[in-house]
Image: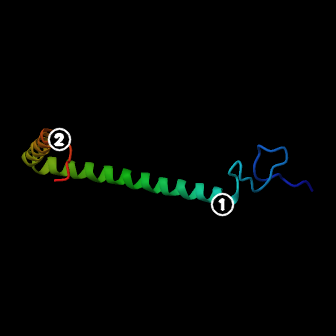
Amino acid sequence: MEQQPSGCPKHPEPVGNCRGCGTNPRAGREQARRAAVAGEHASQQEWLREFFAEQARRVAESDPQAEEMARRRVRELARMGRERGPNTGR
């Protein structure tokens, strides 16, 4: 029975806990946790994009004038923000 090497493949004899390479079990679990969190975040962001796109389609279908008024208001607010300059704490 030959044992399969485990751990860091960078060493001549792989070890299961290499602090230099970050291949310890805790680091692996943390990396997996971060990947899961990033995947969940990306999934939520995609859902939000789809939700807001659907909302915009519904508004456009129901009341095109309201959508245009909202766009004008956003442009007006953006223009006011540029004219005032950066926030100065006031």
Which color scheme is applied? rainbow
Query: Which class describes the residues within 10 Å of circle 2: few (<14), some (14-19), or many (20+)?
Result: few
Using the image as rendered, state which of residue 7 and residue 66 is in the foreground: 7
Query: Which class describes the residues within 10 Å of circle 1: few (<14), some (14-19), or many (20+)?
Result: few
x then y, percent, for residue 79: 12, 39
Q: Residue at x 59, y 56 (%)?
A: 32
Q: Amino acid at mark 1?
A: Arg
Q: Is residue 83 left or right of residue 43?
A: left
- Rounded to the nearest angstrom, the CA distance separating label 2 from label 1 is 48 Å
Q: Residue at x 75, y 49 (%)?
A: 8
Q: Is residue 48 left or right of residue 87?
A: right
Q: Tell me the mark number nearer the camera, choosing from 2 and 1.
A: 2
Q: Find numbered disc 2 in the image and state the secondary structure of the residue it sits on.
A: loop
Using the image as rendered, state which of residue 41 and residue 66 is in the foreground: 41
Q: Quadrant of the N terminus?
A: bottom right
The reply to whether the C-beta atoms of the residues labelled 2 and 1 are less than 8 Å apart is no
Q: Is residue 5 left or right of residue 82?
A: right
Q: Which residue is mark 1?
A: 26
x then y, percent, for residue 55: 22, 53
Using the image as rendered, state which of residue 68 and residue 74 is in the foreground: 74
Q: Amino acid at mark 2?
A: Gly
Q: Which residue is mark 2?
A: 85
Say which label, 2 or 1, has the lower sequence index.
1
Q: Quadrant of the rendered structure where residue 83 is?
A: top left
Q: Find numbered disc 1 in the image and state the secondary structure of the residue it sits on.
A: helix
x then y, percent, for residue 43: 42, 53
Q: Residue at x 20, y 43 (%)?
A: 86
x then y, percent, for residue 84: 13, 42
